[in-house]
Image (cartoon, rainbow, N blue to C red):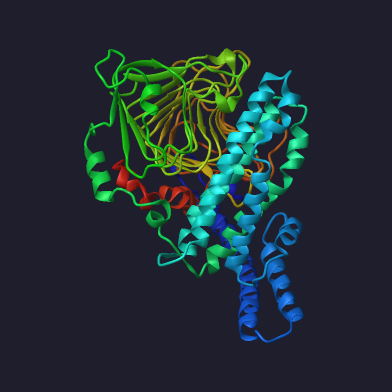
Amino acid sequence: MNSVNSFKGYGKVDELEEAAFRRKSRKRAIILSISLLLLLLLIIVVVAATLSHKKNTNKDSGDVAGARVAAVKSICSVTQYRESCISSLQSSNSTNPAKIFELSLMVAVHSLRKIANLSTTYASRAENNTLAKQALKICDSELNDAVESLDDTISAVSGSGGGKKLSSRIDDLRTWLSAAGTNQETCLDALDEADAEFAAEIRDLMKNSTEFASNSLAIATKIVAVIGDFKIPSHRRLLGEEVPEWVDRRMLQEARPAPNVTVAKDGSGNVKTMAEAVALVPKKSDARFVIYVKAGEYVENIDMDKSCWNVMIYGDGKGVTVISGSRNFVDGTPTFSTPTFAIAGRGFIARDITFKNTAGPEKHQAVAFRSGSDESVYYRCSFDAFQDTLYTHSNRQFYRDCDVTGTIDFIFGNAGVVFQGCNIQPRQPMPNQFVTITAQGKKDPNQNTGISIQRCAISPLATLTAQTYLGRPWKDFSTTVIMETNIGGFLNPKGWISWVANVDPPASIFYGEYRNSGLGSDTANRVTWAGYKPAMTPADASKYNVESLIQGPSWLPSTNVAFQST
């Protein structure tokens, strides 16, 4: 009996089927152990080359050069783009894996900087395509954000003085490198969506930068994570002196922390609009900046870029304080630019507020909220729209006690994101449409990203007659899990649906379910994709909790938002 039926609905387990499942799990564990052994042997070879170089400094230059070439080839063997890795790192004058990794980062950021202003080069060719013009602006923004993510990584790796071992910061490095890859992919997605005549040309132009960033990510994941053996500055020293944690916690423990600025439509605050409040946010500040938004509906589009750090916005409650907009794809705005509210700067917190896109289902893609904020938290918020409601774009994000409502792909993106205690509410789409809750966009196998919906409730908003699915794989390594969640009986028994009709997704995806409940949780008739696990093991599930997927225990406590780490 295969693992597809190992776990029945409501978590009941058949003993014979479970025994077969355990045998298969042991076989997988053996394969994994062999793979890890081979990787360790590879690392030993690389380290041996380094030590040999140190002990034989008087050997002729040919031997030294040979050792360097061997080290580069060994390290590049773990990448997806081995040839570009070797050719780009052949100038290395070291056999030290950490130094070679640092060189790979320099190569990647240099390649990105050369193409970071595409709109200047291609503007004249986009004159007759409004969407293409906007797509080029998205490319400029996203490629510059990718450069900043790589710069953060380089600063961490090349820092001097006391601090932590490089391997202890590997989650940060992988997050920033994953985001850099997502930024580049977002540019290409925008060009494809715009049907830009030069999309293929730019894809070719970006080939080096995408491959180099992927190579650095692979090296960080498979080499540096194991043998990172030199010190780097701690997070606080790297990013500047921050307000002491106890100050932040004391402030956030208050139900209504003292704001730096109050927004009120009736004039009773400091300003009347969100735009005015956001204009007061200091750039790249380590101190928390608090914006209180009083009750009312604020019809505005807000875009807070990567320089807006450590901002907290809170309102008077879901449905009481509302920020709404209506930008949409049908009326000529690229999906990426439709959000009512967008945030990219690190450390964002939102609580007790509704973000809404009122465009309606007939306008297709219309995002209510987009986040690329690393270590961001959303508490008791509502995200209300139809198609593409919540764009969890990149970096690490946590949603607690939130409501998310929509129709098609209404939770999508390539962040590492965990939802806990949330109400996921599919709603009726247009006629002849089906509903998909998630669409995860992992493009590279080494990205530490994925959607994890844990201990939530999935139930319809009002009457729902359309065929409804938990999600569909957007990219080749799409990763989505539903765990310990109550799923209503409205769900199509297949559970999931392919991105392309009647074509199974590649085996490289990871989709899974774990100990769910409710009438829709029975996996007996689920899809039979190679990359789908209808009965995840506890070991599988542990990779997608708050601790493992987003490293929450290291940063969530200071936000004073309740979370379960496992």
For residue 4, side relative to residue 308 (left or right): right
Q: Position of residue 310 (x, y in %)?
A: 37, 40
Work out whether 381 lies above or below 158.
above
For residue 165, side relative to residue 289 (left or right): right
Can residue 510 be seen here? The reply is no
Can residue 492 be seen here? The reply is yes
Q: Nearer the viewer, residue 251 or 352?
A: 251
Total numbered badges shown on the rendered structure: 0
Q: Which residue is at 45% across, 28% downward?
A: 488
Q: Nearer the viewer, residue 203 or 356?
A: 203
Q: Nearer the viewer, residue 11 or 562?
A: 562
Q: Which residue is at 48% across, 53% downward?
A: 172
Q: Position of residue 406 (x, y in %)?
A: 50, 23
Q: Position of residue 34 (x, y in %)?
A: 63, 68
Work out whether 142 lies above or below 196.
below
Q: Which residue is at 59% across, 25% downward?
A: 335
Q: Position of residue 338 (x, y in %)?
A: 54, 23
For residue 396, side relative to residue 115 (left or right): left
Q: Which residue is at 52% across, 61% downward?
A: 158
